[in-house]
Every structure is written in structure tokens, then in C-alpha cells.
Amino acid sequence: MTHSYDESENQGRGPEEPVVVRDRRRVDPQTGQVRPPGPAHAAPEPAEEPVEHAGPSLGESIVDESVSVVSDVEKELAERTADLQRLQAEYANYRKRVERDREAVVLGAKATVVNDLLPLLDDLERAEQHGDLTGAFKAVGDKLISGLQRAGLESFGAEGEAFDPSVHEAVQHNTSPDVAGPTVTVVMRRGYRFGDRVLRAALVGVTDHEPGAAPVDPSVGGELPLDGGPDDQQQ
């Protein structure tokens, strides 16, 4: 029974395919020579790649994630650049402020030293007015004044200047028709400034314009006329 079952099974399968054996060795084992390339040694053809669809499939997102990543990086880079520029501007302003404060401190120190020397300059000026500033004493005084002027000291307060209450201290007041406005006519003490800072105001006498008065003729010198009076006309 077993043998008849096998035959019936083989009869249902049909003729068997012959077994083909391909020798794919590159070197012939009999001759030891390299075999030329043939159909048995030909490289297999690459499989065809599936064609991708141009559009997204159903349910697939159409947003490119790489674009969003680049946008975030650019945004962060712009923020960091703005922070760096702001820090650079703050540092530049800080340096300017430090330099300005340093110059102000230096100028203030110089002004303090020069202010302490103003009484000495007053003594030199009075000595020159009395004719006592001569010889070596005059040479030392001139060097001192020149050095202070080079450092930035400037004197003000002279007769004929227009009165300025910010730099002049009026201790005497007169009126005269010879002036058109408040004018310094007497200087009692010279004023000094160091740079933009006024160290001391000048003590001056001010003469203001007297309205309604006729100006005095300088050729007459304020004397009464010798003729032309009522008594002379009667004679």
C-alpha cells in the first residue's frame, strides 16, 4: 500500500525539473587558472527601486521639519547677536563715562590747587601796581602766572566789560549818561576761571545808564562855561 501511495503522489506532481549545478568558482580546480567572466560569474543586476510618489500620502504631514529647525536656529542667532550688540554698546558707554569721570576728577583736583594760589596772585598783582614787583621776585611771579595759564587758568574782570552777574559781583553802583547799559567801571578784585569752572567772581563797580541826562562834553571836563550865562548877557 505504501508503494502504490508514493506512485500516485508522484504521478500527481508531474515531471520533475532537472537539477542545474553552476560552478561559480573563479579559479578552475583542475587547471588552477582564473576563469574568464561568464554568465555564471556575471554580477547580479540591481533590483529596481520603487518609484516614490511626488506628493504626500494620505495622513502624512506636509510640513518640512528641517525648515522649522533652521528657523529656530536663525531666531536664536539673531537674539544672541542683538544681546552682543547691546553689551558692546553698554561697554562703550561705560568706558566713555569712566573717562569723563576721570577727567572731571583731574580737573577738580587742579582747580582746588589753583584756587589755593589765588591769594598769592592777588599779592603779586598789588605788588606790581605799587612798583614792588621787580628783579628776581618779578621773574618768579611771571613764571608762576605763565604755568597756571598753561594749566588752564584764565582771569577776567576789566574796566569797560559788560556787567555779567554770573561772573561779576557788584559792590558799587553808579549812573552815568556816558554808558548805554550796565558796564564795569571799577575793578576791585580780579576774577578767575579754570576751564569751565568759575573759581572766583570779580568784585567790580557797575555804572548804569542814567536816562534823561545829557552826556558830558569831554572837552569841557565837567566845568561850567565862562560865558553864555544870564549874568553875562545882562552885562
Image (cartoon, rainbow, N blue to C red):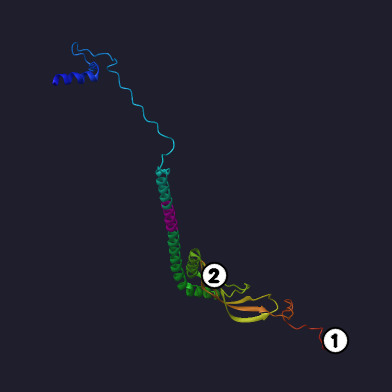
Residue 99 vs 49, above or below: the answer is below
Left or right, residue 73 beside residue 224: left
Check if mark 1's residue and mark 2's residue have beta carbons within 8 Å: no
Q: Is residue 235 visible in the rendered structure shown here?
A: no
| Kind of element beneath mark 2 | strand
Of 159 and 94, nearer the camera is 94
Q: Is residue 89 magenta?
A: yes
Could you tell me which secondary element the residue under label 1 belongs to? Answer: helix
Residue 225 placement: quadrant = bottom right
Q: Which mark is residue 78?
A: none
**Nearer-the-camera pick, 85 or 231:** 85
Q: Residue at x 54, y 70 (%)?
A: 155
Q: Residue furthest top?
A: 31
Please identify the dominant SS of the magenta region: helix
Query: x and y percent of residue 227 in the render?
Result: 81, 83
Q: CA distance from mark 1 to mark 2?
A: 56 Å
Q: Which residue is mark 2?
A: 155
Extent of the magenta region:
80-92
Tell us which disc is closer to us: 1 or 2: 2
Q: Position of residue 213 (x, y in %)?
A: 73, 81
Check disc 2: other Cα within 10 Å, few if <14, some if 14-19, many if 20+: some
Task: Check disc 1 and report the residue beneath it.
Answer: 233
36 to the left or right of 119: left
x and y percent of residue 116 in the render?
A: 45, 73
Query: Tag 1: residue type?
Result: Gln
